[in-house]
Image: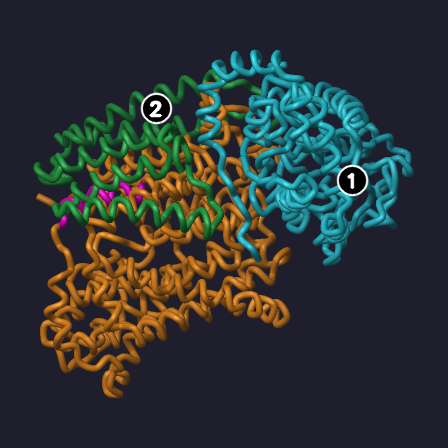
Amino acid sequence: MGDFLMAGFSQATAPSSLIATAIGSILGIVVGMIPGMTISTGIIIVLPLTFVLDPGISIALLLGLYVGGMLGGSFAAIMLNIPGTPSAAATAVDGHPLVERGEAGRALGVAVIASFIGGLFSCLCLLLIAPRLADVALGFRAPDLFSLVLLGLTVICSFAAKSWIKGLLAAAIGLAIVTVGQDPVMGTARFTFGSTDLMSGVNFLTALIGLFAIPQLIGNLASTETGTRVLRTTARFGRVLPKLSDLRRMRVPVAIGSVVGTFLGVLPGAGGPIAAFLSYDYAQKATKNPPEPFGSGAIEGIAAPESANNAVTGGALVPMMTLGIPGDPVTAILVGALLVHGLAPGPLLFIERPDFAYGVIVSFFWANIFNLLIALAGLRLLIKLIALPRTILMPAIAILCVVGAYSLRNSVFDIYVMLFFGVLGLAMRWLDMPVVPLLLALVLGGQLEEHMRVALTGSQGDYSVFFTSPFSAVFLSLAAISVVWSVISSRRTAGGAP
Amino acid sequence: MARRDLIAALVLLGFTAGFGLLTLRLPDRGLPNTPGPAFFPGLITLALGILTIALLVRSLRGIAVEPAVLPGAVATRGWIAIGAFVVYLIVMPALGFLFASVPFFAVLTWVYGERRLAVVTLTSIAVPVALLVIFRSGFQILLPSGIGW
Amino acid sequence: MQPAPRYRADWENVMRDRQRSLARIAVTGIALACVADVASAQFPERAIEFIIPFDAGGGADIEGRLLAEQMSRALGVPVVPINRPGAGGAVAYTYVKNAEPDGYTVSWNSNSLLTMSNLGNVEFGYEAMDHIGRVEFQPMVVAVAANARWADLGALLDECAAAPNTLRISNSGTGSATHLGALALASAAGCEAVHLPAGTRRRNATILSGEADAMVAPLTGALNLVKARRFRVLATLSPERNAVIADAPTATELGYDVDFDLFRGLSVPSGTPAAVKTALADAMTQAAQSEPFMKLAGEVGFTVAPMPAAAFEALMQTEDTKVRAIIESANLLSSGTR
């Protein structure tokens, strides 16, 4: 492992990779911070570039953006009380009261340090867990992989939706869309209506641009929040570097947040928001007699969710790298960016391209370092960008969506596909149906079918293979449990309502 | 009765029926003792059918709070934005990226509330030109050309 | 690494399609007035689209891009690689077949041209295009895990014959060249195997996980793991031994009459003027024998062997017959359209 780590280190520490990481981090902080933009928006902006850049550099850029975006979201949450990303909502609870007291710098400083530690902890876990998990995953056969992908999908659905029906329906619609094009085993044209454009199917990156960017662009029409409000408060910024006493108070909450975040990051679909609120809750229970009560500017209440939502990033990279199963839109894009370059994430990547696999981990490490440095050095400057004029920003993003959809396969048709998914995304928002299960069904659907058919070919049509293989049996039972659990928990919430 | 869920369930019912019908008409080919190309779509039809019926049943029984996605006046601007998008995509192959993007950008800045004519004009020319230059010179991605660049 | 150039010419073609009928009338008139040679004497006078039917970053893509770059030096105009992946090559081949036959749209090709048409996934055959020539070829290999119990190909196939439908051989997809290679080998040994359509991404993994007993793969796809001593090559399906893995015997040597190499070459739309094709063929040969291309060949394991159009077409005809025979005997064509 040492040699490969060194190879990965030299790849990820090349000047071009480091510059990409830094640019990604700045861009991430900015897009995360601006209300109405999310990490997904930032990723859509750089997506076309990842097709032409060297894969190592693209990944460095995207990881910088991922990590920076998590932090940027918290800046908006703290300064404006509007979470820039959903994961930052918990941070706003205690972060914003500090801003109102004129201690903006203190709140942001704690957030930056907590994020850094959370991110670094998850990076360490990634480095320790990923190669071992990849070794285990190397033994997985087609039936196991089928069940694993199915488990990933059901877990995503159960976390994503208030209503189990709508979560599973979104996934089923995604799976139906995946079948358009050539079948993955022998290339029979399905549902193509004779169109060559449809023969190659729907690329999930195209779909993602439409699903996430268009509803957001439309939704932003309604919001009048411009961020100018923040400029008043920056007058009383205070010191940014946390005092020793604050650092001491952060210890326990950060430890809680890092562990909870990493663990929930590994579970597909759970992600930032759940980790942030859960660790906030634990930190509240673990802190006896805080100087400021929770909810009115407790340092612990910022540190726990902040470390958690950055720890999620490293956790989410574990299943993405070792199993090829992404848990959120960002890791889905990372998978897409690797596939474009012919590098399929999964256990084999650690054997065939160990330099690259470890390079990703090292890039993630650098992303956390840069994030800390950039945030601390440029905090006052970056905060001003919250007030960027959205009248120009939003149209620019609309055009970048078109460029992104077009440049993936040099295809006009893909722009129309992107628009179709934009309208679908709006319809799903109208219906209160989650889009993440649909997106991940698009990412994983092809594999699901391929593994199932290979498994049944290997068993010569005997369906029992899915239950006789121990791995597969375990995954299938967990999948069943996650569906039952989401049915029960949505019953319970429905019962509570009048 | 949850109106939106009911509408969605009915639309999905139609979709499932169509999808199932097309699945039935898929050719059966492949090696002996192996599932063919219609196998997986068949399973999906089944799943879609069950879930859609569940949604239909629940929509008829349940009561739902259905907040408007956008307030009325904003919704109009939303439709204008989508309309502009459609027109943009239709004319782009003929006009090329630059000539199509400039008016589209101008419309969108207006929709997002920018009323200063100078700002609208300046940005709607500057941004597409900048993007074109960055992509063409920086990344060697040629954007659609049409009559101009 | 330099960002790979990805010039886009899609929109021009949309317009070109619309204007084509008008243009035809005009061109016919002009052609009558001019000496037929004038246009082709100037070839090439603008950038050439080099269509790659596979995803960016894969082996075929890297080889294609390098060839395009070298051809561009030979021709003095940009030769711009454009990926049009999808549908096992069908998307790209359909695009090139329908392009203007003026030499400015060239397709990087492979055996996929023969397999996808014989499977009936597209409604045209290899003869619907003109061919410039072959650039390179590589053998397919039969590989097993390094610690597998079979000492040689004979032992593997004997076991297969002794217990029909138990030995699992994985390939890159049903109907792909690797599947056809495995089918041909099994039929030469008179045995029935289970063919796992593991796909290019999972094929190697099925050997490591023990899910498959053996696999048929392109040499370039297996070489990394052979060098890492995770795989053992039992034989190549080539008429002659390959210098890259010189100690691996050929199947023919071992008494199994299978010879099925993977080629890559160039194709253009049918009806491209002869002089244009000659110019492209010269540039292709020059590019293939250029130092960078030969160096890449040595690294990843393919053999540079340029072949002129006539010989290439004859080769394709033989290979097409083989492909069709295997597909028909395996009964893969139950819904063929050809």
Give residue A438's position: percent from left, percent from top. Answer: 35, 40
Vertical arrangement, residue A267 with respect to residue B61, above or below? below
**Residue A487 or C287: which is nearer the viewer?**
C287
Instruction: Tell me, yes or no, whether the two marked residues, 1 and 2, touch with CB atoms within 8 Å.
Output: no
Q: Closer to the camera, A271 or A27?
A: A27
Reading the image, the residue beneath label 1 is C139
Q: Read off the magenta span.
A: A211-223
Residue A113 in view, yes or no: no
Quadrant placement of the C terminus of chain C: top right
Q: Is the residue marked by circle 1 packed among few (<14), some (14-19), or many (20+) residues within 10 Å?
A: many
Left or right of B32? Residue A45 is left
Q: Amino acid at mark 1?
A: Pro
Quickly name the residue at label 2. Answer: B16
**A85 over C205 or under it: above or below:** below
Q: Position of residue B45 (x, y in %)?
A: 39, 26
Q: Mark 2 — on which chain does it sit? A: B
- The quarter holding residue A253 reads bottom left
Tint applied to chain C in the drawing: cyan
> In the visual, does C116 lie left or right of A226?
right
In this structure image, what is the colour of chain B? green
